Amino acid sequence: MRQNRHYLLVLFLVPSLTSCFQNNNQTSGKAFPNIVLIMADDLGYGHLGCYGQEKIQTPNLDRLAAEGMRFTQAYSGSAVCAPSRSVLMTGYHAGHTPVRGNGGGASLREEDITMAQMFKKKGYVTGLFGKWGLGAEGTAGIPNKKGFDEFFGYLHQLHAQFYYPEFLWHNQEKVFFPENKNLAYQTYSHDLIMEKATRFIEENQDTTFFCYLPLAIPHHEFIAPDSALDLYKGKFPEQPIDFWRENYALPDEPKATMAAMISHLDFTIGNFLRQLDNLNLADNTLVIFTSDNGPAVGPLENPDFFDAAGGLRGYKGDLYEGGLRVPFMVRWPGKIQTNSESDQQIYFGDLFPTFADLLDLEGNHIKQLDGISVLPAILKEDGVLKRDFIYWEVGDYTREPPFDLIPSTLMQSIRKDQWKLIRNSPESPLELYNLEQDPKELNNLAEQNPGLVKELYEVMIQNHQKAPPQKDMSREEAADKYIPTHE
């Protein structure tokens, strides 16, 4: 079921990119802002100081929130990495978006249209720096085929788990780092990625650009530069780690390492934002910061110790609030009210139509998207956003033909107004929560509201469409390609 939008008419999708995006003649010719979209990996709703974190220092992101707007009910596209990123890039929710397998190598198809292609339609220079996860080498889904002029970083998600890789991709060419062989830990990929992103905005300061930064921190492996570790060494009580994962360097102080990674993420983003200031670009740049899903759980992540989910139930992989609700801040000086807060419900699927609204673009494709424009919420205009629902799902897919969903693994959830319905597997009982009264999802109200459960369940079932084949390499092949060697 597509959402009924008060400002959209439903038209059929056509294959021509030009006919999909049309300028609004009434407003064409106005200047448009640069867009910087920064996304952390597995950063929880409670990991930042501006969302209540007390143990990890994040002054630059806290300042970003103070200089703009902080959303308190913003959601990722899914509870795991790849489908969440697919929702973000395509504007289709997790039941419609093309990439739903989370193995790391499932690809967007040739016919799939991304927001980067939309920006190209409006004349933007587009750059992607970080973790892609929507198409490995040799597929139709690589960034340079999906609207990005420049790409530097990781294609496959398994590759992105290592911060001292033996190579990264620059467009379609490998850039090798022989100094990192045999786990030598010389070139920290995150720092190099941020350097490339900074150079991109310097080189394109006289144009209009879209800079997408899907950064890998704080996803494992768990390792941080010494300069960041110095902030936390010996600060936290540590528990011995009673397991070993091959080819992963286990930190002596995992809590200190997790905190240091997040603080280092904050530090480098601060440097990037200061460069926008130095280039006199900040006033004409819309900056968005978010995370791809909730915090990961494990003895190295220590989410309970850090209250990483901000007191919400669940973690990465769960369809409870802790797995889906993410930090989301926006800054646009002179346009977005400083030190403001919004409790409007938004999610990743909204960004594509929001950017289209901002750019005065409309057309067949935009009118088919599952998200809505949340530009009124960002600009603090009056009224509550009108939407029918937000839908999420998570499932595992086979790694051999037909690369199809394993039915027993399908998890689904839907939010409509204050109500949220969850089904954790096809055999699990339905759970209903009133998030206004019970944001921690402790009181299942399904038995008391059978009519509402039936209504939401029917919408939930209708919004799961069969996925395209989630073709991916085997785990063994991926390991051979992407795990650093130790001779």
Image (tube, rainbow, N blue to C red):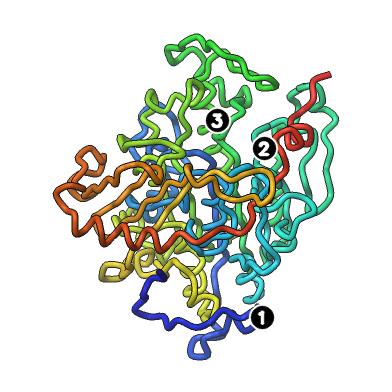
Is there a contact, CB below 8 Å, between mark 2 and mark 1?
A: no
Relative to residue 56, is residue 139 depicted above or below?
A: below
Quick one: 267 or 428, which is closer to the camera?
428
User: At 33% from the left edge and 68% from the top edge, which residue is drawn?
Assistant: 387
Mark closer to the chain start, 3 or 2? 2
User: At 47% from the left edge and 57% from the top edge, which residue is drawn?
Assistant: 348
Instruction: Assign a secondary structure to mark 1.
Output: loop
- Mark 3: which amino acid? Met
User: At 44% from the left edge and 66% from the top edge, which residue is drawn?
Assistant: 371
Image location of residue 238, percent across then percent down: 46, 12
Residue 291 in view in this figure: no
User: Mark 2 and mark 1: span between their CA atoms?
Assistant: 34 Å
User: Mark 3 and mark 2: span between their CA atoms?
Assistant: 19 Å
Instruction: Assign a secondary structure to mark 2.
Output: loop
Q: Residues within 10 Å of mark 3 (few under 14, many from 20)?
A: many
Write down the residue under mark 2.
158
Write down the residue under mark 3.
261
Image location of residue 89, percent across then percent down: 57, 60
Write down the residue under mark 1.
16
Instruction: Assign a secondary structure to mark 3.
Output: helix
Mark nearest the camera among 1 and 3 is 1
Relative to residue 53, is residue 323 depicted above or below?
A: below
- Mark 2: which amino acid? Leu
Quick one: 7 or 433, which is closer to the camera?
433
- Mark 1: which amino acid? Ser
Residue 362 in view in this figure: yes
Determine whether, in the image, residue 70 is placed left or right of residue 227. Answer: left
Image quarter of residue 342: bottom left
Q: Give the position of the N terminus as an image quadrant.
A: bottom left
Image location of residue 10, percent across then percent down: 45, 81
Mark nearest the camera among 3 and 2 is 2
